[in-house]
Image: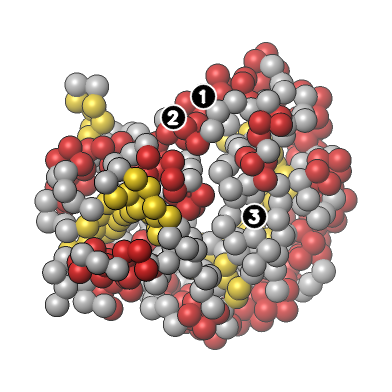
């Protein structure tokens, strides 16, 4: 029996909103549900606070988290998974936890802490960071915390000891067999009526290394067997009654279509499954869709969305970010989707504000996005570039005149126009004009 049996797993909400209720397209963070299943299998008692279950309060200029504060009174350890986008909220959560229960160990994982572990430990009250994949690391770390020894032998962690930061050796990535042996996610702990999507994973990593991308396993793609994946889909669909709105299954793979024949086999098998009132969403590369029968198989299953990383509206940018495709490939892909009657499910994501881009270049991308969706159908999603930790652009940001370091994500300032003005070649008036132009063309803009 474990001495520290009660583990609280959570992730911060995307926004500091008092009423953090269901939102369109929301999905549970798969990592904490997988870890919950692993921990339960090893004798731990686990509670989850899903991001949409957090309630945020503001009292005397202090951010409080009533749901979290209630749960930590009955926890031995708190584990928080955070992205760079949500790290500033995670920091607030950590401050609040430590103000109430100073001695409770706090473990942070996720992509942000993986790349910025030393900064996270030095600039917050986090006790331990789990870098990379946490399936094996978290179990070993918890055992070491319980035993009071062996912490230096746990691969893949960083931690503080007497104010000094220690960084153990990296843990090797999970093998495909280890991924396949991971227990099914503990979706029984998922809140009901707050999410539209349920998340499933078939692979990790990507065979490419785009300059703007911050995923951990670039140039390292691993996919589980198709039969095992089908069991995961069936497992997820068993919890469809917990979903609300336009119910769907979302594949969280970094690059689901990397192995084209495997993707075809998976989609072919899914045509035999009863999705009930749910449908499927996934992300794909345009060249994979063009050079396979993936789209033909998609026409035989209920599709909610196919996300396609278009990135830019001109080929010079495609080359600079090492995307491996060109604008003609995006248009050919759009043509093929229309042929199979799938145009309306396509979501083409674009980025504006690359370090070399002036207003003219940004508008070229927006014009191309409008051309694609107006001619072929679908949605065009326009995003300002973020210099995410772990990406090549982040590592070279000073060459482009971008000021600041990891502290950029310690507060909400990175979402403000002031940060854009300091980070992008375009001027303040240009930013306003670009955003107004997107609104005029009725493109879906996430600024």
Q: Nearer the viewer, mark 1 or mark 3?
A: 1
- In the image, farthest residue toward the top: 429
In the image, residue 357 above or below residue 211: above
- In the image, farthest residue toward the bottom: 227
Secondary-structure class at tag 2? helix
Q: Position of residue 358 (x, y in %)?
A: 77, 24
Q: Position of residue 431 (x, y in %)?
A: 66, 21
Total numbered badges shown on the rendered structure: 3
Q: Quadrant of the N terminus?
A: bottom left
For marks 2 and 3 on the same chain, the one whose residue lies earlier in the sequence: 3
Q: Which of these two is toward me, 13 or 441?
A: 13
Residue 412: which numbered mark, if any?
A: 2
Q: Residue at x 60, y 62 (%)?
A: 217
The answer to whether residue 248 is left or right of residue 21 is: right
Q: Nearer the viewer, mark 2 or mark 3?
A: 2
Q: Quadrant of the C terminus?
A: top right
Q: For the residue carrying disc 2, how many other residues have a C-alpha within 10 Å: few (<14), some (14-19), or many (20+)?
A: some
User: What's the CA distance linking mark 1 and mark 3?
Assistant: 26 Å
Q: Position of residue 270 (x, y in %)?
A: 58, 78
Q: Residue at x 72, y 79 (%)?
A: 261
| Residue that carries the numbered disc 1 in the rendered image | 416
Secondary-structure class at tag 1? loop
Q: Are marks 2 and 1 in contact (CB under 8 Å)?
A: yes
| Residue that carries the numbered disc 3 in the rendered image | 307
Q: For the residue carrying disc 3, how many other residues have a C-alpha within 10 Å: few (<14), some (14-19), or many (20+)?
A: some
Q: Give the color scheme: rainbow, by chain, secondary structure or one colour.
A: secondary structure
User: What's the CA distance linking mark 2 and mark 1?
Assistant: 7 Å
Residue 431: which numbered mark, if any?
A: none
């Amino acid at each position: 029996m474990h001495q520290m049996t009660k583990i609280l797993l959570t992730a911060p909400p995307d926004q500091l909103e008092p009423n953090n209720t269901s939102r369109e397209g929301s999905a549970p963070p798969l990592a904490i549900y997988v870890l919950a299943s692993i921990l339960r299998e090893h004798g731990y008692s686990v509670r989850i606070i899903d991001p949409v279950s957090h309630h945020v309060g503001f009292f005397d200029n202090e951010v409080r988290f009533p749901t979290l504060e209630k749960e930590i009174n009955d926890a031995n350890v708190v584990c928080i998974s955070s992205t760079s986008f949500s790290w500033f909220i995670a920091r607030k959560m950590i401050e609040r936890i430590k103000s109430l229960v100073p001695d409770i160990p706090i473990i942070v994982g996720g992509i942000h802490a993986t790349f910025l572990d030393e900064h996270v430990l030095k600039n917050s009250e986090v006790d331990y960071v789990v870098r990379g994949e946490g399936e094996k690391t978290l179990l070993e770390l918890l055992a070491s915390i319980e035993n009071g020894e062996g912490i230096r032998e746990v691969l893949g962690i960083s931690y503080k000891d007497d104010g000094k930061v220690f960084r153990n050796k990296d843990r090797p990535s999970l093998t495909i067999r280890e991924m396949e042996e991971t227990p099914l996610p503990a979706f029984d702990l998922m809140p009901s009526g707050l999410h539209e999507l349920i998340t499933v994973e078939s692979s990790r990593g990507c065979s490419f290394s785009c300059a703007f991308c911050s995923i951990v396993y670039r140039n390292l793609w691993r996919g589980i067997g198709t039969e095992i994946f089908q069991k995961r889909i069936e497992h997820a669909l068993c919890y469809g009654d917990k979903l609300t709105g336009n119910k769907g299954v979302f594949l969280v793979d970094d690059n689901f279509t990397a192995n084209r024949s495997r993707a075809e086999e998976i989609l072919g098998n899914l045509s035999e499954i009863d999705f009930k009132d749910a449908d499927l969403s996934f992300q794909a590369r345009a060249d994979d869709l063009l050079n396979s029968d993936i789209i033909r198989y998609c026409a035989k299953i209920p599709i909610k969305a196919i996300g396609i990383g278009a990135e830019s509206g001109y080929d010079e940018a495609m080359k600079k970010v090492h995307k491996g495709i060109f604008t003609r490939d995006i248009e050919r892909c759009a043509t093929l989707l229309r042929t199979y009657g799938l145009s309306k499910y396509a979501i083409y994501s674009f980025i504006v504000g690359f370090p070399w881009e002036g207003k003219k270049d940004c508008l070229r991308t927006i014009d191309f996005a409008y051309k694609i969706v107006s001619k072929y159908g679908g949605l065009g999603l326009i995003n300002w570039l973020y210099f995410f930790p772990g990406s090549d652009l982040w590592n070279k940001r000073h060459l482009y005149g971008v000021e600041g370091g990891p502290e950029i994500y310690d507060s909400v300032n990175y979402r403000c126009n002031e940060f854009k003005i300091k980070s992008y070649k375009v001027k303040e008036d240009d930013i306003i004009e670009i955003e107004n132009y997107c609104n005029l063309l009725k493109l879906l803009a996430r600024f």
